[in-house]
Image: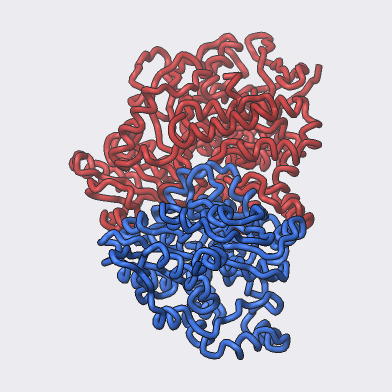
Amino acid sequence: MLKDISLETLNHCAKCSTCTANCPVAKVNPDFPGPKAVGPDWLRLSLNAETKVDYPEGIEYCSNCKNCEIACPSGVPVASLNQLTRAEKLKKKGFRLREKLFANPRLLGRIAVNFAGLVNFFTKIKIFRLIGKTLFGISENISFPAYAHKSFSRWFGSYRQKVNKPKNKVVYFPGCFTEYNKPEVGEALVKILNRLNYEVIVPEFKCCGQPAIGNGRLDTAQEFAHFNLSQLKKYVKDGTPVLFSCPSCLLTFKEEYGGLLGIEEAREFVPYFYEAGEFLRGLQEIDKLLECEPIEGKYAYHEPCHLKASGVGTPGLELLNEVAVNKIVPLDAGCCGLSGSYGLKAEKEPITEAIGQNLKKAIDRHAPEALVTECGMCGVQLNNVSGLPVYHPLELLAEKITKES
Amino acid sequence: MKKLKTTVLIIGGGATGTGLLRDLALRGIDALLVEQKDIAHGASSRFHGLLHSGARYAVKDPNAARECIEENLILKKIAPTCVEETGGYFIELNSDDPAYTAKWLDGCQKAGIEVREVDPNHLKREYPLLTKEVKRVFEVPDGTVDGFRLCWANVWQAEEYGGRYLTYHQLEGFEKQHGRLTAAKLRSSLTGEEVFVEFEVAVNAAGAWAAEVAQLAGVKVNLLQNKGTLIAFNQRIFQKVFNRLRPPSDGDIWVPHHTITILGTTSVNVDNPEILRPTPEEITKLLEIGKELIPEVLELRMLRAFAGIRPLYLGEESNSQDSRSISRDFVIIDHEKNDGLKGLISLVGGKLTTYRLMAEKTGDYIGKLLGIDRKSKTSEIPLTPALAVEEKNRIARRYIVRAPKIEERLKGVTEEKQVLCECEGVTVAEIKEVARWEDTHNLEDLRRKTRLGMGTCQGLNCAHRGLGVAFTELLEKSQEPLEQLKEFLKNRYAGQKHLLWGEQLREAELLTGLYGCNFSLFGGTDDV
């Protein structure tokens, strides 16, 4: 896997530096030499003893936002290469408890969702955050995503889907954020799909693996990937579409499983993976549903980097604009800077904050009353910088189109 | 007109000339070296960078094999920063003649070359790119040598011992009195200034240009100009030198040279030393042979093709055209004995690995002529300090006696730590400091000393940046900075244009676009 990525990189990188120019981290943090320097440049120089350094300096600052890969005109898997190198470096240095915890949000979520009130309370108390920083290197100021009182699965288990026969089926991968932090998103999707006469299947899943990749735990990510793929196998064989409401989960299934994690068979699954909005927009029947009560109010939209990297466009925004009274404008401010658990780490806090400034400026300029984005963690950052409520497009849509007339 | 005086005038700044300058300087014999372009611009850098163990000559030329291994060991000892002790493999494929292997093993043993057989499966595992046809593998003490670095190391050490040198000075003619050469007329190709040098002995060490120098003195040196073409790959493919175990032939050496790998060579006779253009036939041939070792060689990115001229001495009347059968030995021609002309010695043939020995023998000869009986010290006095091939020694290894100033800059100003040439890892401090040196006359000189622009991008990112950060320093040179950039790009393009397909074509197009739009220079393509 590394050999393939190395060879691709060495052959294809034109050294144009477009990746570095598009890197949100390099822009604000002089300690990060940029994706090209820690990736293709380092790779080439590391083969020569006179220029070889064991691991590139500053590679820890890569947030795997994928903007380098999106920007690369030569198709070099820059981010993947950097995740591999970083994972190796972290492994050698030894993982901290922090990385182990963040690598598996399911573990944290399963506990926290039962004590949501308590957890949410404690993560807001300064003194506990200070302890967290001293002991675990967890950022003291960036707010944590709040946990829901009831997980999506619990809701889904007791929810009776209303679907007329003959019914169509889709599989839904809710992802950890929907599962433990914002089950409303999953609920919205299930309700919309039911209205379109689709029955939703949610098999047992593990985390997609993106947080594990981001924390250098590639073995863990691989384990998750294999489990998730095995759960999907029988559905995909029947041609059942698999839907994602979280862009990072989607990207991980679509790109990382077959690419970075080197799981060959994952590539065969890719044609069945859909971003939820992408899937909905492709259905003719949706048009009728969109003739619903319009969405009032002034919203602005943030495009998550991983959605961009998934190559599906912004179907959620387009669907919303079909029903919105005021056109929902894209903030067009680039990466939010939080990048999952990246921004929750103490040393990354200033970087996250600095990258978030663009977002803040754009929000101030548009002065919306609420914000819209697909990614849960982007939502946390949007709320951090603006204090405004943040919705997933599915939530706003569901509110209108599932209203009983 | 500038007038200079020296005991020995050395014409030619390649390994031969600079080696002799060092040899004479260490003996305390006054010497001045003149070079028409920059140090090591000819065959001393236009070769595969192999420090022979002698194994390549073990069957055909036992004498050369013995000389090679002796000099190989001496160079590793005295010039550890100019060489890399990579080791090398000789690889017998299923299609090769096993009888040759037996002869070769015998030859190596006789020459005193240490040979160790290696498990071919080990090699196949380490290099999955390698053909499955590998039958037997032998390890030998081959190494690599940086021609630029070695030649400059010679010059700089000679300078410490009183040796002098002039680069970019073209020889225009000699003064002759009573059957003896007494002086040379030179002209600076940068400023046009004339220089008149009086000497007692002149040494023609002009390599491929030796016949032309001889002609200026009215004598003849019978040389065969034999062109060898090489291909530089974008990456270090192997960590050791890879040789084919068969009678020396085209395309059978792969040398890991710094960040790249060089595959060579061909052997084609040409009419004059300026014919350095690799032909499509040569490149096709090299790649066809390359395929035998790496079946997917075409998948690997190639940066450039380049050629050097081997000046092979034909002797008095030889008209042999089979270049591989001509000895690679060096010859000292005293033109007094051959042509009745006093004061001129021609030094021809030889190979880089044995450059020191050549200098020592010539030094002995000159000493005898001048009646100065002093022993050569070149095998005892270290040329460069013993520093391991490591990143932390990179600056000290590359810039040798001139390294301290650069290291000081790197400790001081933060901005100067920035990597300017990202493909080769060259910092701003290096560019600024090297640009200041008196023997750096333009961006091209800067490149040869630092490796600026020698990597993947071939100048795309680094040429204009280099010009930018060293502008003040380059402005002091006799050539306009923009002209320097133009020449730099022209030379980068000249090497690339023979291999313009796939990724390197994209690179060249990007480069042409960038410089075309921003500097009206079209990446050098408008001028070739």
On-image quarter of the N terminus of chain B: top right
On-image quarter of the C terminus of chain B: top right
Residue located at (31% from left, 65% from top): A167
Residue located at (56% from left, 43% from top): A15
Residue A301 or B201: which is nearer the viewer?
Answer: A301
Q: Left or right: where does residue B274 sit relative to residue B322?
A: right
Residue A113 or B442: which is nearer the viewer?
Answer: A113
Residue B499 or B444: which is nearer the viewer?
Answer: B499
Residue A335 in picture, x, y percent from top left: 63, 58
Which chain identifier belongs to the blue chain?
A: A
Residue B144 in picture, x, y percent from top left: 47, 45
Instruction: Answer yes or no: is residue B366 visible.
Output: no
Instruction: Answer yes or no: is residue B436 visible.
Output: yes
Residue located at (71% from left, 66% from top): A353
Residue B398 or A401: which is nearer the viewer?
Answer: A401
Residue located at (69% from left, 17% from top): B184
Query: Looking at the image, how many numbered discs can be counted on the residues?
Result: 0
Which chain identifier belongs to the red chain?
A: B
